[in-house]
Structures are given as structure tokens and as C-alpha cells.
Amino acid sequence: MSLNALNTATAGLQVTQAAIGLVSQNVANSGTAGYVKRTLTSVSQLGNSGVAAGAVSRTFDAVSLKQLRLETAGAAYTGLTAKVQDQLDALYGTPGSASALDGVMNSFTQSLQALTSDPTSAASRATAVSGAKTLATTIARIADGVQDLRTGLESQLGSDVASASTLLSQIAALNTRIAASSGGVTGDTTTADLQDQRDQAINALSQYLDVQVSPQRDGTVTLLTASGATLVDHGAAASLGFDGRGTLSAEAQYSTDPATRGVGTVTATTPAGATIDLVATGAIRSGSIAAAVSLRDDTLVEAQRQLDDLAAGLSRALSDRPATGTAASANGLSGFDIDLTGLQAGNAVTLGVRNAAGVGRNVILIPTSGGAPATIDPALTDDPTALVVPVDISGGPSTFAAKIGAALGTGFTVSATPDGATGSVRILSDPASLTLTGASASVTVPTSAADTKTGSGPLALFVDAGDGNGVFTGSFEGGSHLTGFAQRIAVNPAVAADSATLVDYAATTASGDTARPQALTDALTNRTRTFSAGSGIGGVSAPHAASVVGFTQSVVDARGAASAAAGQLDEGQQIALSTAQSRFGKESGVSVDEEMSRLIQLQTAYSANARVLTAARDMLDTLLRI
């Protein structure tokens, strides 16, 4: 009995000593980032042979850890979004200031109004030209800034993807070591240390992308994306790659077709060799990588579209004449007559149609000179839901009716307008099956930048510097001329060289004639134009109607609102992250007070075991002395 007591007390001392060592380790690491509190379980031995040290386990709440990773990914997403939205908003300047986009636009319109008051003033004409140059330069500068932000995000994506791929490899390697150490020495802290390292690696990975963690029986974990793609399985990890494109332009956009994709994409290559496009499959939904992709491909592309639409609206408001259809009917058919005289490639003609069921839709006719693609993406027009029909007008005005009729096909009757000008057409349909509800177009009057004597209204004050200073018409010849026009807009060299063209609209214009300055002013401030739904102003499913000045203000307001909303969302997300960190730290971190209390208990147990050991030794000594 004394020998059994001696063995039991010795075992108790050993277990207590190990537990005290663990308390010491906990206290020493109380301030170590990522350290999770350890506990030692004691195991009763069979045959009443005492106690033994069990496994060293980590004390944490799996739900809290999952929430921490979720909030970490969310905070990285909102943090980058808020940062870039703030940088984007700064490009437009402080609303209302002289150097802000709306301020520069207002200064330009005021210079035109001043010219209307005194068209003979050379100083007023020079001021108007200077204002136009400043406006064009400002739009181009902001657009360049948008592409600089996209280029920066492209670079960051390369860096973030490389870091995430390294972390995946580290996690897989730790999985292998944990699986090997799980059968190691009882009471050894090696496995717990490795698990801490793995958790820290997964937490770091969560800053880049959201992952789902599934523990396995052998102590390893499997990592999957939100869409179910496996990134880590036991000791094998997928390799992440990013084929960055360097400096981005407005034309460089994402596509699921590698042949047309102009930006980098994130891919995962599995150990078996399969490659998955994580962007195309929507596998990454949070973290800095998801934020960078969304900003590069959505937010900043929309900002570019707003600037392109503004530049196009500014140019064509001054150079175009509006053409509106007038109701017409013949032989039981009804529709519209519309004067398309002077129609140029890109001058879209919009027809409103409604079927017998009462469902309405726009049909957009895109005039081409034979160099436009056979199919045109509706997203590149004002109405992304419209049916876009290219029409070859290279044969001249006399062929307009025949070409439009052939393009529209059955259901429409198209002819030259009786007694109308060459280029005027009549478009009719049978109301019983298809009703025409409207017809409109914006026809560019000048045929070249040098064509400044085009009547009292239209003037190509702004031109496309990337197209040999050609008149901007919205053409699709060789691709969309709208995309990137904000970077290319410039003042017509003919106007810059002779500011009198702001007033002189004919070979003989009376001194003091205010017709052209007034027309230019009205075109910017009073005439309503249609801006594309792709700009996101006023919604993304329908075109937005506003004056050029009004659209400019809407763009500035939208950018400020988006920046403020992103900042507020990030503020809330950072609070959520802080709360998750605090909760996890409270449940898994080391409390020195608790450890000291535990140490006192262990000291008491150690003393008790020592007394038992002493008593057993005394009993043995007594027996030996008999």
C-alpha cells in the first residue's frame, strides 16, 4: 500500500509540475500576438496506479474565431474601398471651388454668357476659349487619375495574390507538421504551437480573401473559397497566380474571354494541375483582393464612363442639332417622319417601340461607314436594354431609307419622307402588332474641325485629339470612340487659333450678333440630353436625361456620396472587427489573474502530493527498521 501511495504521489507531482510549467508559459506569452491559452488535462491511470499528463489543448471558441476571420476579410474589403473612393473623390476637387470639376464647368458657361453680353469683345472671346481649354484639361486630368488608380490596383492585386499564395503554402506545410506531431509525446506543446502558427497564417490570409475552414480528424484543416473551390487540402495547397498587365487604359477591361481581357485575373492552380479563374467564377467575395477587383472593374470603370459621357455630351451638345420625329401615318400604318440630313457615323437614331402586349423597348440604329463591328454591345449606347441595329450609311443620304428598312426588317415600312429633304425618312409600323412611340436623333452638323461656318448654332468647339482632332460623333468605326474620350477631348485648334469663330457662324456675320454664343450657352445649360445608364447616374437600367451642366453636377454629387457611404461602411466594419477581436481575445487570450489563481491551486496540490510522498517514505522507513 505504501509503494502504491509512493507511485501515485510521484505521478501527481509530475503532472502538477507539468501544469505549473504550462501556467508559466501562458503568463510569459500573455502579450504575444496569436498565442492561445493552453490547458493540461490529467488522465486517471488504470489499476489505481495514479494519474498521468494528458494532452495539451488550446482554449478558444471556434465560433468566435470564425467570426474574427469573417470580420477581418470584411474590414480589408471596406478599408480598401473607402481609401480608393476617397482618392477618387479628391480627383474632382472640393465641390463648388474654382478648380473643382463643377466649378470649372460653371466658369466656362459663365464665360459664354459674358460673350453673349458682348460678342465683339476680344477679351471675352479669349476668356471663353481659355475656359474651354481648362475644362477639357480638367476632364482629361481626372480621367487620367482614374486610370492611375486602376493601374495601382492592378499592381496591388499582383502583390496581394503573391502574399496569399505564400500563406497557402505555409498553411499546407503546417498541416503536414501538425499531422505528424499529433501522435507525439503526451503533454508536449509542439502541436499547440503549430496550431497557433497555422491560425495566424489563416487570419493573415483572411485579409486577402474570404475562406471557409474545415477541421479534419488528423488535426489538419481544409480551406475552401466561398464558392467551394479547394485551396488547401491536408498538405497540398493550390498555387495562386495573377497575370498583371502593367499600365491600364480606359480600353483595358475585364472579360471572361482571355483573348479580349485587358486586365489581370486571379487563378488557382490545383496540385492536380487544373486551373480555375477565381474572378470569373466569383470565388472571392471579400478581402482586399475582392475589393481591388471590384474597384478596378466596376467602380472605376463606371467613373471612367461618367467622364466619357460628360466629354461626349459636352462635345456633341455644341456640335449637334437635335432631330425629333413628327407623327405620320399612311395606309393604316403609323409612325414618324424624322430629318436625318447630315447624319454621320455614330449619330444614333432611337426608336421607341411597344408590342401588342404593351411591353416597350428602344431600338437604337447605329449609323456606320462600314468599319463598325457587326454587333454592338448595347452597354456602349445610352440604353443597355435596347436592341442595337447597325446601319450602313456609306451610300449617302439617298440610301438612308432603304438601308434603315433593310436593317429593321419585317414589321416596319421605311421610305423617304414625301416632299422632305434628302436624308429625311418616314418610319411606319402596324399598330395592331407593333407601335412606334417615338423617334429621335442627335445629328452632328460640322463634318470637320475646320468646318466652323455651320450656322448660328452648332460648333465643333471640342474635338477628339486621339483621332487627328476629328469631330466627335460617337462613331464605332474600329471600336467605340466613346471609351476613353475623356482622356482625348481637346479644344478645336481652329477655334483656338481664331476665337472669332465663337461668334462668326457664316461668311458674313453682323457685328454684335449674339446668336451663336447664346446657342452655345443654351446647349449646355438648358437643352436636355440623354446620358447613358452605364454612367450609373439616375440608375443603371435606364438612360438619364439632364443638361450638360446638370449632369456635371450629378457626377460630382455622386462621387461625393459614394465616398461618404464607403467611409461610413468602413467605420462600421472596423467597429465590428474590433468587437470580434476583443471577444476572441477574451475567450482565448491569457488572463494573468486567472493564471495566478490557477498557480495557487497547483502549488497547493503540489504540496499535498509532497506530503503524501513524505508520509509514504516515513512508512517505508518504519517498516525497514522493524
Image (cartoon, rainbow, N blue to C red):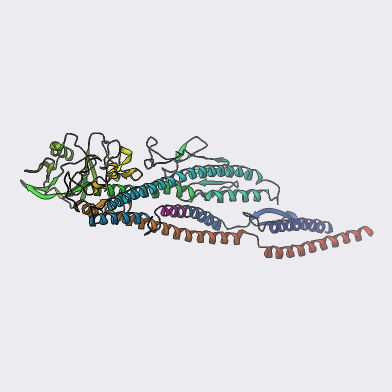
The image shows residue 93 at horizontal and vertical percentages of 40, 55
- Give left or right: position of 468 versus 442: right
Is 89 within the magenta?
A: yes
**Residue situated in front as seen by the camera: 75 or 237:** 75
**Is residue 351 visible to the viewer in this orientation of the structure?**
no
The image quadrant where one finds the C terminus is bottom right
- Give left or right: position of 342 versus 215: left
In this rendering, is residue 68 above or below 423?
below
In this rendering, is residue 624 above or below 427?
below
In this rendering, is residue 85 above or below 230?
below
Question: Does the magenta stretch mainly form a helix, a strand or a loop?
Answer: helix
Kindly indicate the quadrant of the structure image that contains residue 35.
Answer: bottom right
- Give left or right: position of 256 versus 333: right
The image shows residue 606 at horizontal and vertical percentages of 78, 61
Residue occupying the point 47% across, 58% down: 570
**Residue situated in front as seen by the camera: 256 or 18:** 256
The image shows residue 356 at horizontal and vertical percentages of 15, 50
How many numbered marks have been drawn onto this rendered protein structure?
0
Q: Which residue reaches farthest right?
A: 626
- Give left or right: position of 591 versus 211: right
The image quadrant where one finds the N terminus is bottom right
Residue occupying the point 23% across, 55% down: 116
Is 435 within the magenta?
A: no
Kindly indicate the quadrant of the structure image that contains residue 379.
Answer: top left
The image shows residue 260 at horizontal and vertical percentages of 37, 37
Residue occupying the point 23% across, 34% down: 370
**Is residue 224 visible to the viewer in this orientation of the structure?**
yes
Q: Which residue reaches farthest left?
A: 331
Residue occupying the point 65% across, 60% down: 590
Magenta extent: 82-94
